[in-house]
Image (spheres, rainbow, N blue to C red):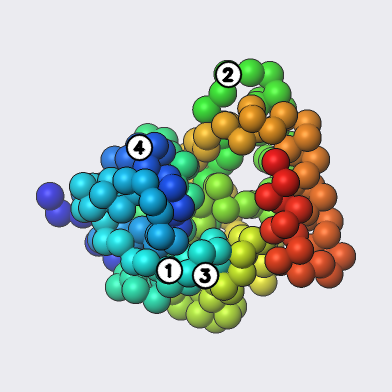
Amino acid sequence: MTPELPRLSVVIPTLEAALVLGGTLGVLAGHVGEIIVADAGSADETQAVAAAHGARVVVAPRGRGAQIAAGIAAARGDWLLILHADTHLQPGWCEAVAQAMQVPGKAAYFRFALDAPSPPARRLERAVALRCRWFGLPYGDQGMLISRALLDAVGGVRPMPLMEDVDLVLRLGKRRLTEMPVAAVTSAERWRRGGWLRTSARNVMCLFLWFGGASPESIRRIYARR
């Protein structure tokens, strides 16, 4: 099958993601130029799942920023789509990406959605939409589509253990960000496991710590306390 987006490389950082990765890759396979899974040494079947879906596996140092940077370095496309392993793109994503690629001076992200039917999920989705609209702060679980030229111009993805997504969008600035009219559905498991209010409060605290000058490593330790 000829890819519909041959210039696009998809980069997905993974660690023990075998249970969720197949769904993400299944939507992408055959539609893009290449898929690169930047794995941090998973002990489960993550790498086997990636290979079964035609993805190229790159082994990278642990830490989402470092993994994404390694995947980008290995990618051949002049456009990049950075996705999380548990983020499934909804119908219409390919057309939305193709349209966004007509504007190389801007980066694009998907609308945030969760795979839970509960009222807390809908409230969180509305809060994220407002955060993106008012402050231009999409997170990594919304995906990031960006041309290699623009990414290089703003200094690339920095090899940070956490907050690499916020770091990148702040360097891009709100005027160079646009939302695509398609949802990227992310697993709500971490909110269900950690509690909706507690998990959201921790995420907000990490953001405030970042703006307050805390190091990515110190924020990572706080984020890991689930």
Q: Residue at x 44, y 47 (%)?
A: 16
Placement of 14 over or under 117, stated as above or below? below
Placement of 91 over or under 82, stated as above or below? above
User: Which amino acid does the dot numbered 1 rest on?
Assistant: Ala
Q: Secondary structure at mark 2?
A: loop
User: Which amino acid does the dot numbered 3 rest on?
Assistant: Ala
| Foreground of the two, 180 or 219 | 219
Binning the other alpha carbons within 10 Å of mark 1 as few (below 14), some (14 to 19) or many (20 upward) gives many
Q: CA distance from mark 4 to mark 2?
A: 19 Å
Reading the image, the residue beneath label 4 is 23
Reading the image, the residue beneath label 1 is 60
Q: CA distance from mark 2 to mark 1?
A: 35 Å
Reading the image, the residue beneath label 2 is 117
User: Which amino acid does the dot numbered 4 rest on?
Assistant: Gly
Task: Specify the quadrant that holds the C terminus.
Answer: top right
Reading the image, the residue beneath label 3 is 66
Q: Secondary structure at mark 4?
A: helix
Binning the other alpha carbons within 10 Å of mark 4 as few (below 14), some (14 to 19) or many (20 upward) gives some
59 lies left or right of 157: left
Q: Residue at x 56, y 23 (%)?
A: 116
**Outermost residue to the front:** 43
Task: Give coordinates of residue 34: x percent, y percent.
Answer: 27, 60
Mark 3 or 4: in front is 3
Q: Is there CB contact under 8 Å for labels 3 and 1?
A: yes
